[in-house]
Image: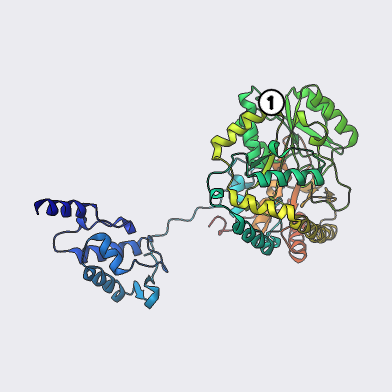
Amino acid sequence: MNRSKDEAVDRSKELGADFLQLDAADAPPGGLTDWLARRLRDAVADGRLPAGSRLPASRVLAAELGVSRGVVTDAYRRLAEAGQVAGRGRGGTVVVTGPTPAAAPPRPRPAPALFREDPGPEVFDHLRVAPARIDLTPGVPDLAAFPRAAWLRAERAVLDQLAAHDLGYGDVRGAPALREAVAHWLARNRGIRADPEEVLVVAGTAQALALLGRALGQSGITAVAVEDPGSLGARQHLAHWLAATPPVPVDAEGIRVDALRATGAPAVLLTPAHQYPTGVVLGGERRRELLGWAGEGGLVIEDDYDAEHRYDRPPVPALRAALPDRVCYAGSISKLLAPALRTGWLLVPPRLRDAVLDAKRFADLGNPVLPQLVLARLMESGELDRHLRLLRRRHRRRRDAMIDAIRTHLPAATVHGAAAGLHLMLTLPEELGCSDTELATAALAAGVKVQPLSWHARLPYPPGLVLGYAARSPGEIEEGVAALGELVRRAGQPGFQGHWPGEIFA
């Protein structure tokens, strides 16, 4: 009898609810109902129980706490009388009020240095959340065109066929089905012959650069040359892992290989199919020079940026197809489907494969498997090819709308890179009267978001803007460019720079 009593005492010590981490042992003697009502009220007030959340059934919570059901029902009744919860029949007891508002912290004021000439790594985070009536920043695809119906069909088909063991940890290199689909996609669209075993699935081009940066650093390579002008974001990712990213000028034929040789850098990052931001395609003679440099021991990191988005020119073969042992190839679906999927692929020469795979393993143990299987199905079924054809028609109309608007409202601007991609680069007259960072600042104050060209150039280059057109309608594009044209006409006048709108970063 005594043993049974001791066991009951021991069991009572184990009672408690995962719900709000409630433990009846914390209640004062004779005050269970008051204690429970107060704990529930506090959870509603501080947001742990937001409006719409459901409380546990009274008998369930009472059993977990080791108290009578009357304690729980009385506590729920008190909250109902205070208007914090309501009974919904079979829907249970539901919270109907939100948290008690705390004193609002002062809103951070926008940093006037957002468009400074030496932006830090956080600048894209700030720019992404800065509100604007018309967002013309580059690198944003038409997210409204995401093929939701096709994705759902593929997802249902994948789940119907998925075995239980497929829900475990996957291959760090990526799901075999996606690696095979990527190998087929690259063969028919980019002329690259690769075995699925060579494909590493990564979280976009950004992670590909991070993995390469770590692997190259471990192998003793501390400098990777970059195009100039060239992507600020890509340069920042490499610079985080490596000591140096010397700039190499880009002209009408692409990167200048003679200047690349002069840097002494053993590796270079390129966007040869559609150079960012100029839109230049690496010319035939320049391509031969580059491959000669690589054949002598140089390493090329090929970011196949915007290769699939072309309108007025034939396709350009990937460098990886010509010299696989000296080219690291990175691609993604960020501009084809959506950046939110965080899915891309990386091919590296055999000598770097183990180091890059280790970097991926210790970064995240591999990408989520389910989205990989869905993407593989879209690729192999032809849905992704159909989606690409739809996007090309849509993007071409928007590109044409932007070019027409620039001719009308910015006649002094020179347009670059119109034959492909999702953006245009504009260069403006040297006598503009202000810097392009000041122009971008004024544009954001007027509700139009753009990027200054000087962000992407460390060598001397004319002032300009980089404008994305894929995510905006022709009407919005015309309106945004018209606003830019008005600002250019006012450039250099007193008070031109204006003030930051108070709601930015609110």
Asked if 143 appears above or below 452 in the picture, the reply is below
Q: Quadrant of residue 34?
A: bottom left
Q: Which residue is mark 1?
A: 351
Crowdedness near tag 1: few (<14), some (14–19) or many (≥20) residues, C-alpha within 10 Å: few
Asked if one can make out residue 226 in the rendered structure from this viewpoint, the answer is yes
Estimate the x, y position of residue 300 in percent, counting from the top left: 75, 31
Q: Is residue 134 left or right of residue 103?
A: right
- Residue at image x 27%, y 74%? 77
Asked if 490 appears above or below 357 in the picture, the reply is below
Q: Residue furthest left?
A: 2
Asked if 237 appears above or below 298 in the picture, the reply is below
Task: Name the amino acid type tagged 1.
Answer: Arg
Asked if one can make out residue 277 in the rendered structure from this viewpoint, the answer is no
Q: Nearest the camera: 370 or 498?
A: 370
Q: Nearest the camera: 256 or 12?
A: 12
- Residue at image x 34%, y 66%? 56
- Residue at image x 9%, y 52%? 2
Estimate the x, y position of residue 186 in percent, counting from the top left: 77, 44
